Amino acid sequence: MMSVRDSLSPQEALAVMDTAQRIAIAGHINPDGDALGSALALQSLLRAMGKDVTVLLGQDHAPPELYKFLPNYEFVWASEYSEVPDLFIVVDASTAKRLGNSERILGVARDTLVIDHHTNYEGFAHHYIGDTMAPAAATLIWRIIKASGITPTLDMATYCYVGIMTDTGRFAFKNTNASAFADASEMIGIGVDPAGLSELVYENKTLPALRLEALMTDRIQFSGAGSIAYSFILKDDLRTLGLERDVTEQLPAILRAIKGVEVAALFREEGREGIRVNLRSRSSFNVGAFAREFGGGGHAGAAGLTLEQPLDEAISCVVERLASELSAHT
Ligand code: 5GP
Ligand code: MN
């Protein structure tokens, strides 16, 4: 396993990119604003450097509707990508397991590079540039853009802003630091519209999505004397409401915002994928470390895991373990 010391500098990462002509980029499955924004920003930079670039999706379904406002919101399914890239770049993922169909490209590409901000990078690529203190993978992309000598465009700034805004929960989560504000300030100087982008991501809910929130809220249960809040979403909920799974991205934060709650868990029935569990913490309890005990991962404040069990068993198993670890945690 690599440590932070093994990270390349932005200049060294650019040198790796410079030697390649055909480049494929992929983020993690069930992509969020950071995975998508980072991949598209990097694509923009690499195209400005004269490279031939493709952004891949690790699952064979459309990317989230929510981020459709981003320029050049076009992707290629990794399952249909038949080229042999000179370089395959993974953004916003610390483990190959999170790549879905894109994982195959690791074995095909001539060279591989990971750009990431998670802890516990699993060392699955030739090159790595990472910073576990960075609020978003987009923070690292922004550093690379600035080191490139290419003037950042409004599109590049917009992609990176969306990555940082969403991963920090609008500059509010524990990972929000001075760099988030410093970068945002630079991006706004280039023309990024913070209110406009916030509105597009957070004030653009459909009525069915709001109804899903109501369903989830109705099902909230507590454990650990109110310190743990949990709820669930069924596959049928999405089907009945005519929704895609990506509308569930902002739901775990609602659970964590309840008075007295330290840790929130949202259980989502995902059919073939099993039960997905989104974890959020606002105390010093590290949900990333907790998720790793179940083969998942993530950050101290936001993490996820997958269980192949019926929903009720998954819930009791995770909630019991959470309650006992949280009570042992000082
Ligand atoms: P979310 O709950 O929004 O899916 O994920 C929260 C954070 O944890 C994200 O940074 C995400 O990349 C990470 N994460 C979620 N699920 C997993 C998982 O199964 N494995 C790993 N390594 N990270 C995960
Ligand atoms: Mn991220």
Image (cartoon, rainbow, N blue to C red):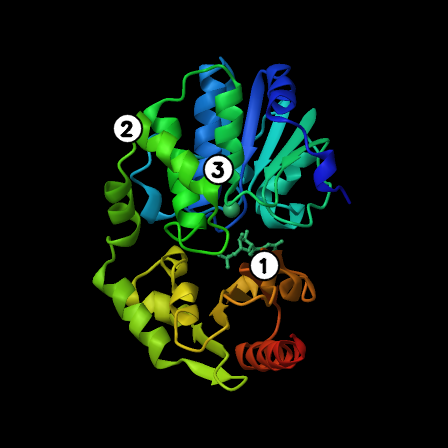
Q: Is residue 330 above or below residue 204?
A: below
Q: CA distance from mark 3 to mark 1?
A: 18 Å
Q: Tag 1: residue type? A: Ala
Would residue 280 be seen by someone viewing this image from the given angle? yes
Image quarter where the N terminus lies is top right
Q: Position of residue 162 (x, y in %)?
A: 38, 41
Q: Secondary structure at mark 1?
A: loop
In percent of the image, x 65 and y 81: which residue is there?
A: 324
Instruction: Answer few, some or many: residues within 10 Å of disc 1's Cα (few below 14, many 20 plus, some between 14 and 19).
Output: many
Lower position in the chain sequence, tag 3 or tag 1:
3
Would you name the residue on which mark 2 appears?
A: 191
Q: Give the residue type at disc 2.
A: Gly
Q: Is residue 228 above or below residue 143?
A: below
Horizontal and vertical percent position of residue 273: 56, 61
Comes first in the chain, label 3 or label 2: 3
Closer-to-camera residue (322/206): 322
Ligand 2 within 8 angstroms of badge 3 C-beta: yes
Occupied quadrant, residue 73: top left
Q: Which residue is mark 1?
A: 300
Q: Which residue is mark 3?
A: 138
